[in-house]
Amino acid sequence: MRRGTALLCLGLCFSLLLNGCGEEAEVRVITRVFPDGGMQRSLRLDARDPARKEAYPNDWLAEGPGLVLANPEAWDTVESGATFVHAEGNFSPGETVPPLLGHRGLDGGDRPDRGHVTVKREDLVVLDQFLYEETLGDPYGGQQLASTVDDLLAQVAVRLRQELQRQFGPDVVTASTESYVTTQARATLVDFLTALRETEPPGKRAQRPQRLQEVHAKYHLPEASADPEQAFWDGVQELINRAAAEAARANPRLDADEIVDFVDDAVSGIVKEPALQPAVDALQTALVGAYGLGMRTRFVARVTLPGRLLRTTGTPDGDSVVFVFDQDDLSSADTVLRVESAELNGEALTRLGARRDLEADDLLRLTALLTRPDLAQPLRAALARAVETASFKPLREGVAGDALKQAAAEVADLLDPSRTWPPR
C-alpha cells in the first residue's frame, strides 16, 4: 500500500478508539406529554469505571469521560455529582426542548448532541391525535463528516497545485486536477467514510463488505476486495491514481509516468504536513463521532402520550412506550423515537350519540380517514356538522363526490352504535 493512501486512511483508527474506553454509563429519560402539547421531562445520567479502585474526583464525569448536560439553563432543576447528573424540566407547547447530553472538550468547548423533539396535536372533531417524534444523534452527523472532508480536500487541492508548480513550473495546468479532488474524489470519499461509520456497530459489521462494494460500483472503481480494510485502501488509492491521471492528461507536454509518480508522492507529503493536521484530526473525530471516542452509553427512554397508543417504533409498556438504544446507534445514524396516540373527545361523542368502545383498529381507521390529505377538510367539516346537529345525517347525506361519500359513510358506520362494524 502506498504511503499516501495510508495517511489518508487515518480515520480507520476509529475501530481501535471504539474499544479503548472502559467507562460505562446509563441515561434514563422520562417524558410525559400533556393534552395541550406541553411536556414534563426528567433525565438521569449515571456513570462508572468498573476498573477504578480509588474514589472519583468531583469533576470526574465532565473531565474524564467528558459527558455533560447539554444545556443546564434549559432545565428547571439540575443536580450533579462526581458520577451522576439529574435534571427535570417542564416545557410549554412549542417550546424548544434541549438536547440531552454534550461532550466536554470537543472543538475547544462543549459540543451538544444533535436532538430535536416535536409534538403535534391534531383536532379530529371526535378525537385528538397526538404525534411525538424525537431525533437523537451524535454531534458529528453526516453533514459534519462531509464538511470535514471538504475542508481537508480543499487544502490538499491547494497544496497539490503549489507542489505541481514547484516541480514542473508555473505553466503547469492544475485546474482540472484540483476540481477532481474537490468534487469527484470528495463525493467518493464521503460515501466510503459514511459506509464505514454506519457499519461500525457490531450488529451492522457484516454489511460493511457489501456497502464498500456498492461504493466501488457506484464510482466505477476496480472490483472491491472481500477484505473491508483493503477495499477501502484500494478505493482511496484509485482516487489518487485518477487525480494523477487527470494531471497527466491536462499536461500532455510532460512525461505522463513522471507526473503520475510525482502526484502520488506529493499527496503523501501533503497529508502529513503540520499545517494540515488540524483538518486530518477533525476528519478522524467526525468519522469516529463523539460516542465513538467516549464511554459505552446505554439509553432508556420512556414516553407517555395522552389517550390510547396507536403506533410506535418502540415497545409498549402499560400506558407508555420504552425505547432502548446505545452509543453505537447514535454514532452510526440518527435514532428516531416515534409515538402516535388518540384521545377520544367525550363531549363530542356524547352529543353525537356515538360509540365509545372503539378498538385500536377502529381508531387507526378513523385517524387515517380524517387525516387523508384530499378528504380531511370536507370530511371533518361534515363530522363537525354531525356533532353539532346530534345526527349522522350530515355524514350519510350531506357530502358530494364518490370518494368523500364513501369515506363519510365509513366514518358514520365506525361511530354509529346502531351499525355493526365491520359490516357483515
Image: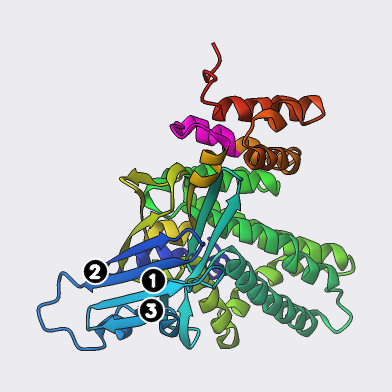
Q: Amino acid at mark 1?
A: Leu
Q: Residues within 10 Å of mark 2 (few under 14, many from 20)?
A: some
Task: Say which quarter of the image contains residue 298.
Answer: bottom left
Element type at marker 3? strand
Q: Position of residue 292 (x, y in %)?
A: 40, 66
Q: CA distance from mark 1 to mark 3?
A: 17 Å
Q: Which mark is residue 69?
A: 3
The magenta stretch is 352-367
Q: Position of residue 18 (x, y in %)?
A: 36, 64
Q: Residue furthest top?
A: 424
Residue 354 lies in magenta, yes or no? yes
Q: Amino acid at mark 3?
A: Leu
- Circle 2 sits on which residue? 22
Q: Which mark is residue 166?
A: none
Front residue of this view, candidates 310 and 290: 310
- Circle 1 sits on which residue? 293
Q: Position of residue 85 (x, y in %)?
A: 29, 77
Horizontal placement of 347 versus 266: left or right? left
Residue 377 visible at all: yes
